[in-house]
Amino acid sequence: MILSFMGTGAALHIRDEEEGLFPMIQSKLVSQSAFVQGKMPVEAMEEEHQLAKRALRRIKELARLIDEDPCAESVKPLLKEFLEERYWTVQLYEGHIWKENNILFPMVRHLLTRKEIEHLADVMKENRKVTATL
């Protein structure tokens, strides 16, 4: 159940940003030459999305393998990898959310008009009607 929630919640989050928010702010960032360590802020966030997608797919795969025969001796290294991958993914999301709250969202409030933000919220709300999964 938790793996399904992680896959769906993460997929919706990623889709909201990559299909809604990022395209809206990308051109404005380019026009302002808003680069951080040689990258656009959106590029850095998208890279983290790709890392998270891979990690969540691996976590789901490991859980499936462990569930096949949870008492087998061969499960020990899978369980170790599962726990390490889960821990790493939590760390990734903690940093990602910090960047959103402290860098990305303040930037969005500066770059977008109130009307654009309201439109973005409507687009995201509409997108949530169709479930996404990783």
Image (cartoon, rainbow, N blue to C red):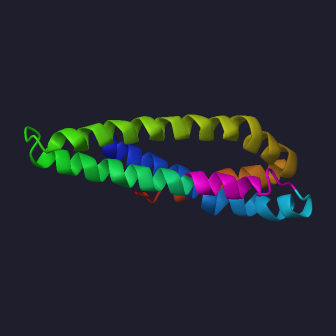
Q: Is residue 41 magenta?
A: yes
Residue 70 x, y percent position in the rendering: 11, 40
Please state the total of marks drawn on the protein image. 0
Q: How far across and down, in percent of the image, does residue 42 sit?
A: 71, 56
**Residue range of the region highlighted in magenta in the rendering:** 34-48
Name the one closer to the observer, 51 or 110.
Answer: 51
Residue 1 point in image, percent of width and height:
27, 41
Q: Is residue 78 visible?
A: yes
Is residue 125 visible in the rendered image? The answer is no
Looking at the picture, tell me which residue is in the foreground, 79 or 45: 79
Q: Which image quarter: residue 119? A: bottom right
Q: Is residue 24 above or below residue 56?
A: below
Give coordinates of residue 32: x percent, y percent: 92, 58
Asked if residue 124 lies left or right of residue 134, the reply is right
In the rendered view, does 68 fall on the left or right side of 33?
left
Q: Identify the image quadrant of the C terminus.
A: bottom left
